[in-house]
Image: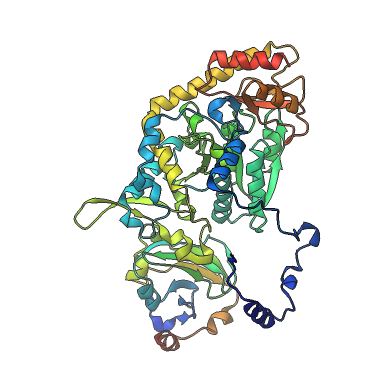
Amino acid sequence: MNYIPNTEADRREMLTSLGLKNVEELFKDIPSDIRRLSSPKIPSAADEMELMKELRALSAKNLPCGSVLSFTGGGAYSHFIPSAVKHAVSRSEFLTAYTPYQAEMSQGLLQAVYEYQTMICNLTGMAASNASHYDGATAMAEAAVVSCNHTGRDSVVISGAVHPNYRQVLATYSLGGKFSIEESPVLSGKTDVGRLKDLISEKTACVIVQMPNFFGNIEEVFEIGEAARSKGALFVVSVDPISLGLLAKPSEYGADIVTAEGQCLGSELNFGGPYLGVFAAKKELVRLVPGRIAGMTSDHDGNRGFVLTLQAREQHIRREKAASNICSNQAHVALTAAAYLSYVGEKGLEAMARACRAAALYAHSKFTGLKGFSVPFGTGFFKEFAVRLPFSNERAVKALQNNSISAGPGLEAFYPELKDHMLFCFTEKTSKADIDRLVSVLSNV
Amino acid sequence: MFDPKDLKFTKEHEWISPDGTVGISDHAQKELGDVVFVELPKLSADLKKGQEMGVLESVKSVSSIYAPADGKVVKINEKLSQTPELVNQEPYGQGWIAKLELSDRKQSGELMSHADYIAFAGK
């Protein structure tokens, strides 16, 4: 069956009106060496039973998180998800709605978004949260755009200790020509604050750091925030929401915009997505915040109701001058985060953060005494830290996989100077016995 | 409060007085509806004629305010941060947006008179 409805005559007519001889001419701007000139090889059709068999065999090659002992971190985290959370958010009313086009008809969803925003504000100390973005990286890049719009400046200073993939997304955003990026070096697993300060000037729209940073370490956020303020730049911090159970609220160290990857709040690793971009800002920035915002109001009878608010920022009204052309959000993942946070509660979050830190500290003590291994960046971490192995990352991954253990990522790919360094992450799910097993496997490589 | 007859008007519905005060026309405020937020220009910003100098947000739309002539922003109407509705209530008075120190007086002379503007806006 042919799925392309154009006839040969249609094609000729279109080509003639474009002044082209053949379809090939439409693609002449694409270098031939990156074009695929033949169709990909697609096997012939299989029946359902055959197909299921083949797909099962394929999926058996996965090492799902539930069947391995995981010490993998680096931006996506496997925390415990209470079954009540999954149950609550699996209601079909929540699963069917993408973006309600007559938003106010979906009071339940708007209320859920409103609750989510409220919790994010409580967690970060910010005044306003949006209804979410795609992921932590896009949320951070959007914060850079907001900073440029607010300050009228066009230079973004970012620490080299921010997640490498996040910096890549920021670099992609900068291709639009709105801002240029200056990156400070890393010193012993942390932002080189002195060098970072040298980069901050009257042209700096914002200073971006991650807290804890990519190496799992706590940054000198009070000092960095002060340095940003002294030059009139905004201070943007990308946080690990779980760490806020233990660490200072970003508002306490003067953050103007707080972004985060919210996957850790009740969502599985999901093969890398959908994730949750958390975005919250101070009140004076609210009209520049991208994306949707749910607000609470009352109707003419005085009943409480929920609406999409401050929509004049958004592209369906402001067109090309909108704060951002991001209009989608991760409503269901945000809902999951809200369900998770209400289930865990303030005390639960603190207990969890403490358990993460305690597990990481225990692991640190085990690695410290281990012959051939070293832990180069001290104990100023939250739940993950780098270990220098006496062998390559590939060897470590292979040995761990043979024992159904996952860890990493290796740091060499991102920071060539950190040869044989690997990240290890510990959460409330990690027991002492788990750590002992990890250390035992590694010490026998 | 200015007498609109003393003002010059742009096609984008701003007015400018002989002393460089800028606001939006009565016609424009009616078209916008209830103004809920005014983004004011930055003090001492150097503006070129036609450059965006602020934003008016109403319950149903948003529009930019464009500089009617080249000049430097010497005063802004801070009252509008708290009471944006002044733009609706008194567009030629307390609803003024900012005051410019004009670098070329001739420029505002090229704009429409009130009578011409009424004819233009009525179309």
Q: Residue at x 46, y 45 (%)?
A: A282
Question: Residue A408, percent across and down?
Answer: 65, 29
Of A276 and A375, the residue lying toward us? A276
Question: Residue A292, percent across and down?
Answer: 44, 53
Q: In what quadrant of the picture does the C terminus of chain A appear?
A: top right
Question: Can residue A156 be spotted in the picture?
Answer: no
Of A8 and A183, the residue lying toward us? A8
Question: Residue A420, percent across and down?
Answer: 75, 26
Q: Residue at x 51, y 58 (%)?
A: A323
Q: Does residue A383 appear to the left or right of A387 in the view shown?
A: left
Q: Residue at x 40, y 47 (%)?
A: A95
Number of numbered labels in the structure image = 0
Compared with A295, B47 (above or below) is below
Compared with B1, A337 (above or below) is above
**Quarter assignment of residue A64:** top right
Q: Residue furthest left?
A: A301
Q: What colouring does the structure picture have?
A: rainbow
Q: Residue furthest right?
A: A33
Of A6 and A31, the residue lying toward us? A6
Q: Does residue B68 appear to the left or right of A198 in the view shown?
A: left
Question: Residue A327, percent across and down?
Answer: 49, 56
Q: Residue at x 56, y 75 (%)?
A: B69
Q: In what quadrant of the picture does the N terminus of chain A appear?
A: bottom right
Question: Can residue A388 be spotted in the picture?
Answer: yes
Of A104 and B20, the residue lying toward us? A104
Compared with A443, A164 (above or below) is below
